[in-house]
Amino acid sequence: MRHRSKTVLEPWNISPSQWRALASLHRHGELRLSALAEHLRIAPRSATEVVDDLEARELVTRLPDPTDRRAILVTLTEAGTALASAVQKAQQAEGERQFSELSPTDRADLARVLRKLQD
């Protein structure tokens, strides 16, 4: 599944870590850099590197946090929002294609096992 996920990202030339950051911002909206690092479960320094790359591609922008001048907010640009939406659609289509290969019984079994692991 990871390999297929990387394949889905290839047309946009973004790495899985960049995609995770874009997806978090798309889902949660504007985030402090520290909060983004927490969502991604990476060190703040690593989040800074990911944001640097995305900012260089004009997919995100940094803004001063109006409530704490020491903090930086990261937000998607219009291009970042459009890219996130396009990648989500492509991933959803790929997921549907992958899981369509399973029988209804296999899908139900997989859902049951995943719920059990989640609990």
Image (cartoon, rainbow, N blue to C red):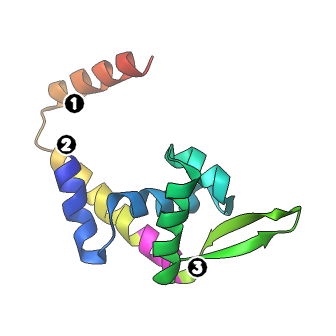
Residue 61, horizontal then vertical, whole percent: 62, 77
How far apart are the alpha carbons under marks 3 and 2? 33 Å
How many residues crowd mark 2 within 10 Å: few (<14), some (14–19), many (20+)? Answer: few
Q: Amino acid under label 1?
A: Arg
**Up/down of 119 relative to 25, above or below:** above
**Kind of element beneath mark 2:** helix
- Specify the quadrant of the image occupied by residue 83: bottom left
> Which residue is outermost to the front?
45
Mark 3 or 1: the one toward you? 3
Q: Tell me the number on the disc at residue 107.
A: 1
Q: Are marks 1 and 2 in contact (CB under 8 Å)?
A: yes
> For the magenta stretch, what is the residue range?
79-85
**Up/down of 6 relative to 40, above or below:** below
Quadrant the C terminus occupies: top left
The residue located at (38%, 71%) in the rendering is: 86
- Of labels 3 and 1, earlier in sequence is 3
Mark 3 or 2: the one toward you? 3
- Would you say the magenta stretch is mainly helix, strand or loop? helix
Q: Are marks 3 and 2 in contact (CB under 8 Å)?
A: no
Residue pointed to by mark 3: 77
- Of labels 3 and 2, earlier in sequence is 3
* Residue 84 forms part of the magenta stretch: yes
Residue 11, horizontal then vertical, whole percent: 24, 76
Q: Is residue 70 left or right of residue 96?
A: right
Q: Tell me the number on the disc at residue 9.
A: none
The residue located at (78%, 72%) in the rendering is: 64
**Kind of element beneath mark 1:** helix
Q: Amino acid under label 2?
A: Phe
Q: Amino acid under label 3?
A: Thr
Residue 22, horizontal then vertical, whole percent: 49, 64
Residue pointed to by mark 2: 99
How many residues crowd mark 1 within 10 Å: few (<14), some (14–19), many (20+)? Answer: some
